[in-house]
Image (cartoon, rainbow, N blue to C red):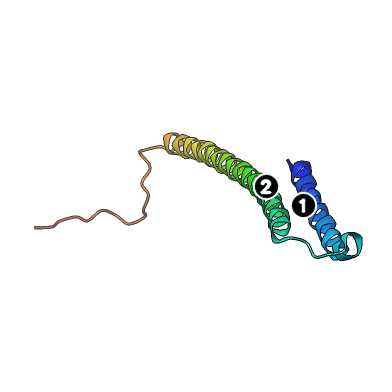
Amino acid sequence: MKKLTNIFQLVTALFFGIGLVYFLTYERMWGGSPEAGEVVSWLLAGLVSYLITWGAGWAHTSNLQSKIKKTEQEKKELKAMVFDLERGVKIEKLDKKIEDQPDDKEGSSIKPRENFK
């Protein structure tokens, strides 16, 4: 697609270059000034050529941007997967630690309160 865009740009530049040389040398070669209809037809053909070039460039840019968006979305999905996997491993380790701790062990050195009457 990039080559096609470059070819259209080259054709458009070449068309306007040939038109410029043609109209600058018209008086010497044919002995008069060019008619308005001839100039308008050249300009319309150049406009069509320019619009085709612009459309091809826009299509190429749009195609590249859609590929970039798709790649970024895949990257985000992969990051989410990795995060979920890492989180799952950490939760499993915590569960194992909790299961391995004995329940009968007292956590504090303070004696429980006794009520005297």
24 in relation to 109, above or below: below
Looking at the picture, how far across and down is residue 74, in whole percent?
Answer: 58, 39
Callout count = 2
Q: Nearer the viewer, residue 80 or 20?
A: 20
> Where, by quadrant of the figure, is residue 21 drawn?
bottom right
Q: Amino acid at mark 2?
A: Ile
The answer to whether the residue labelled 2 contacts the one labelled 1, judged by CB atoms less than 8 Å apart, is yes
Q: Position of residue 24 (x, y in %)?
A: 85, 65
State left or right for residue 4 relative to residue 25: left
Crowd rating for badge 2 (residues with CA inside 10 Å; few <14, some 14–19, many 20+) = some
Image-based side of 105 in relation to 88, left or right: left
Residue 77 sits in which quadrant? top right
**What secondary structure is found at the residue carrying circle 2?**
helix
User: Can you identify the residue that label 1 sits on?
Assistant: 12
Image quarter where the N terminus lies is: top right
Q: Which residue is mark 2?
A: 52
User: Where in the figure is residue 35, as x and y percent of width and height?
Assistant: 74, 60
Image x and y of residue 45, in percent = 70, 50
Q: Residue at x 41, y 37 (%)?
A: 102
